């Protein structure tokens, strides 16, 4: 009694009409949904599809890439939209970030390319190995108004308190040379069994006042001559007097009470010195903590010089309707800072320094890419995945070391 009579044409037509409307609505919903996703997707017929197809077949794919979560690495952390309509006629100012992941007591950062008459806010975060942070803020800084202007006095750094530590037997026979300078400068040690100084350590380009260089590959029961060298920010070079140390007495690491570096500079963690200086058109920061720390510097232009327009160098958004990338990270930022969002330095353990320029004694081959002359995470790791574990550019053996460090 509940069946539909086959000759009841009116009811049959009504049911078919309703069914057609439902199917049509579902189809239209799917079409428009697909169109919307195509509009904002990084991977489409018109954008990056070939790159995705090539790298998605890697044996070790990077999960954000394979899941098409491009914004995780390529967009600023607070970016909320990729919509074209949100980008057009929109200018977004984002802080510029500089990171120094190595744990050091001293950090010197030189910020280049600033507009001298513009006004900047600078936030400095120093973090010790325990994860504790200290923040220092410099507000409304106008480089042209800063009083500490460093001029080239053509005077070499003054070197003092040069000391050679105990001779230790670790993997190699080694000792550590320490000294002080009256201005921030680089570090290097010349040494040898004669005053001809047959060896020199690679120059440490970090600009510091408290210097420490470890000399490796010593021979037992030898008398060594050495001298230390420091070069300031202007290229003036200072050299110490000739000094000596002997490898007649060798200690093992267990014989020496190793200093807890987080306590050795004072048990309280704070910033000991925070100085701003100007070198030419560049703004410098010198920061000294009571314990070794990593460093993060964020700076942003908060006020333009009178009558000047906003410069494109400081704009991470766009007013070009043909560019639909909203709040796109700079290359060095996504190649370092984006990686640290998921892999923070304190959890990585032993890791190659990034955010630095290679030293003169180091040659980076073309197949290990840098960004603007700086070593980043993607120098050794492929960001989308690869054929090797850890997305390595090369097999993680001694071979990858000697690609850059000749004679390793």
Image: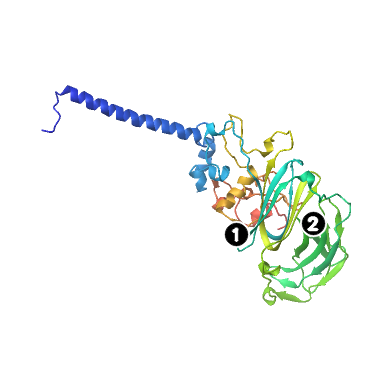
Q: Position of residue 397 (x, y in %)?
A: 62, 57
- Residue 162 horizontal/vertical position (percent): 82, 67
Residue 184 is marked as 2
Label 2, label 1: how far apart the Cα atoms are: 27 Å
**Local SS, label 1:** helix
- Please name the residue that numbered disc 1 is placed on: 346
Count the marks: how many? Answer: 2
The residue at 81%/69% (across/down) is: 163
Does residue 254 appear anywhere in the picture?
yes
Front residue of this view, candidates 26 and 300: 300
Is 1 or 222 nearer to us in this picture? 1
Residue in the image at 70% along x and 40% along y: 303
Q: Earlier in the sequence, mark 2 or mark 1?
A: 2
- Residue sitting nearer the eye, 257 or 305: 305
Asked whether, in this view, residue 111 is left or right of residue 60, the answer is right
Image point (52%, 41%), residue name: 80
- For the question of whether residue 44 can be seen, the reply is no
For label 2, the crowd category at 10 Å Cα-Cα, with few meaning under 14, some 14 to 19 and many 20 or more, is many
Query: Dividing the image into 4 quarters, which one contains the N terminus?
Result: top left
Q: Is residue 197 left or right of residue 95?
A: right
Query: How are the colours assigned in the image?
Result: rainbow
Residues at badges 2 and 1 in contact (C-beta under 8 Å)? no
Q: Quadrant of residue 220?
A: bottom right
Q: Position of residue 350 (x, y in %)?
A: 62, 60
Would you place residue 376 above or below residue 198 in this image?
A: above
Quarter of the image that includes the C terminus: bottom right
Q: From the viewer's perspective, is 30 left or right of 378?
A: left
Q: Quadrant of residue 175?
A: bottom right
Q: Where is residue 113 shown, x and y percent of the image?
A: 74, 42
Q: Which secondary structure lies at badge 2?
A: strand
Crowding at dot 1, Cα within 10 Å, few <14 / some 14-19 / many 20+, comes out as some
């Amino acid at each position: 009694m509940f069946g539909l009579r086959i000759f009841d044409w009116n009811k049959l037509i009504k049911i078919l009409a309703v069914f057609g409307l439902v199917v049509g609505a579902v189809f239209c919903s799917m079409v428009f949904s697909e169109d919307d996703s195509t509009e904002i997707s990084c991977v489409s017929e018109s954008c990056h599809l070939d790159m995705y197809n090539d790298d998605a077949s890697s044996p070790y794919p990077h999960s954000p890439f394979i899941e098409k979560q491009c914004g995780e690495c390529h967009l600023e952390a607070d970016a909320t939209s990729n919509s074209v309509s949100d980008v057009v006629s929109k200018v977004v100012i984002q802080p510029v970030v500089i990171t120094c992941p190595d744990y050091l007591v001293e950090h010197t950062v030189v910020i280049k390319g600033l507009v001298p008459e513009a006004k900047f806010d600078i936030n400095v975060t120093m973090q010790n190995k325990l994860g504790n942070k200290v923040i220092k803020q410099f507000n409304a800084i106008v480089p042209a108004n800063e009083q500490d202007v460093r001029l080239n006095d053509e005077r070499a750094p003054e070197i003092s308190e040069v000391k050679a530590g105990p001779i230790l037997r670790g993997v190699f026979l080694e000792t550590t040379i320490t000294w002080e300078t009256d201005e921030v400068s680089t570090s290097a040690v010349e040494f040898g069994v004669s005053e001809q100084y047959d060896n020199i350590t690679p120059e440490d380009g970090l600009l510091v006042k408290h210097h420490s260089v470890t000399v490796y590959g010593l021979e037992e029961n030898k008398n060594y001559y050495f001298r230390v060298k420091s070069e300031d920010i202007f290229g003036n070079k200072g050299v110490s007097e000739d000094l000596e140390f002997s490898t007649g007495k060798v200690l093992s690491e267990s014989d020496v009470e190793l200093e807890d570096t987080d306590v050795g500079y004072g048990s309280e963690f704070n910033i000991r010195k925070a100085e701003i200086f100007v070198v030419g058109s560049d703004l410098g920061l010198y920061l000294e903590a009571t314990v070794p720390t990593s460093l993060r510097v964020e700076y942003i232009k908060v006020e333009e010089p009178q009558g000047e327009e906003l410069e494109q160098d400081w704009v991470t958004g766009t007013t070009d309707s043909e560019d639909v990338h909203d709040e796109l990270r700079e290359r060095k930022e996504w190649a370092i800072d984006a990686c640290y969002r998921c892999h923070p330095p304190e959890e990585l353990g032993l890791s190659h320094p990034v955010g630095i320029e290679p030293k003169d004694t180091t040659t980076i081959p073309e197949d290990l890419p840098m960004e603007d002359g700086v070593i980043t995470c993607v120098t050794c790791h492929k960001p989308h995945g690869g054929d090797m574990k850890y997305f390595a550019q090369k097999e993680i053996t001694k071979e990858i070391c000697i690609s850059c460090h000749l004679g390793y």
